[in-house]
Image (spheres, grey):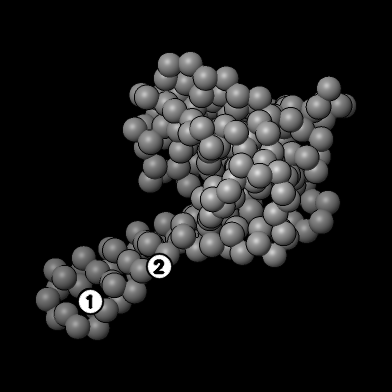
Amino acid sequence: MTSLKIAPVDLAALIASRVCHDVISPVGAIANGLEVLDEETDPSMRDFAMDLIRKSSRQASVKLQFSRLAFGASGGAGAQIDMADAGRCAGEFLEREKANLDWQVEAQLLPKAEAKILLNLLLLGANTIARGGTLTVGATQAENGVTISVVAAGDRARLSDSVRTVLLSGEVPEQLDAHSVQPLYAVMLAEEVGLAFEIAEEEGKVSFLARPRA
């Protein structure tokens, strides 16, 4: 690990790569479906192609909407994010994953940075329960700031050592790529708004907490 700060241009490139990685599969499937429509006359194959295009278009749209909230500049500077909309977007994003969403966010609105932190922790939580499980997401707002919790519960829930180290130390991984940049991005957002991360792990459960620094 190294304590060097990441250059803004590198951060932007890696976040863009992360978004492209997430949508390239459904977009490729749409292209494949269109090729089938161009070449096939068999009604059953054309129906299959249209079904593939519909499902893949929906998947690409959902992923882009989620990425816009989690990584983009949605709402502009100083904006607040409607958490009911964020919960709907998160639920749709997780429909194709093996995780169920238990959305318990009390705050109706959150500042944009805090909303991004919540969604990035949701992504990290989903990655810990690749075999399936439940993500319980909460957020409250008080005078001293916002407290966010994400609890991932499922069979063999496990947080990688690299993600744990980045979240708790804020250090830049030596091997920085489109996947490892995501927890670093969450740390940078947390530093910006004065939040600190805590992690608790037990069998079948990984809990993430972001709350105002003491």
Q: Is residue 172 left or right of residue 94?
A: right
Q: Is residue 32 left or right of residue 5?
A: left
Camera-nearest residue between 24 and 13: 13
Instruction: List the single residue furthest toward the bottom.
Output: 38
Q: Please determine whether, in this image, residue 138 is positioned above or below residue 43.
A: above
Residue 89, position as x, y percentages in the image: 55, 47
Q: Residue at x 71, y 43 (%)?
A: 3
Instruction: List the single residue furthest toward the top.
Output: 202
Number of marks present in the image shown: 2
Residues marked 1 and 2 touching at CB (< 8 Å)? no
Task: Name which residue type carries label 2.
Answer: Val
Q: Quadrant of the C terminus?
A: top right
Q: Residue at x 49, y 55 (%)?
A: 62
Give the SS element for disc 2: helix
* The quarter of the displayed image where residue 67 is located: bottom right
Residue 142, position as x, y percentages in the image: 82, 26
Q: Earlier in the sequence, mark 1 or mark 2?
A: 2
Asked whether residue 115 appears in the rendered view, the answer is no
Q: Is residue 141 left or right of residue 47?
A: right
Q: Residue at x 42, y 26 (%)?
A: 157
Q: Quadrant of the N terminus?
A: top right
Q: How busy is the neighbourhood of tag 2: few (under 14 within 10 Å), some, or many (20 plus)?
A: some
The residue carrying mark 1 is: 36
Q: Is residue 140 left or right of residue 182?
A: right
The label shown at residue 27 is: 2
Asked whether residue 36 appears in the rendered view, the answer is yes
Task: Name which residue type carries label 1.
Answer: Val
Instruction: List the single residue furthest toward the right.
Output: 143
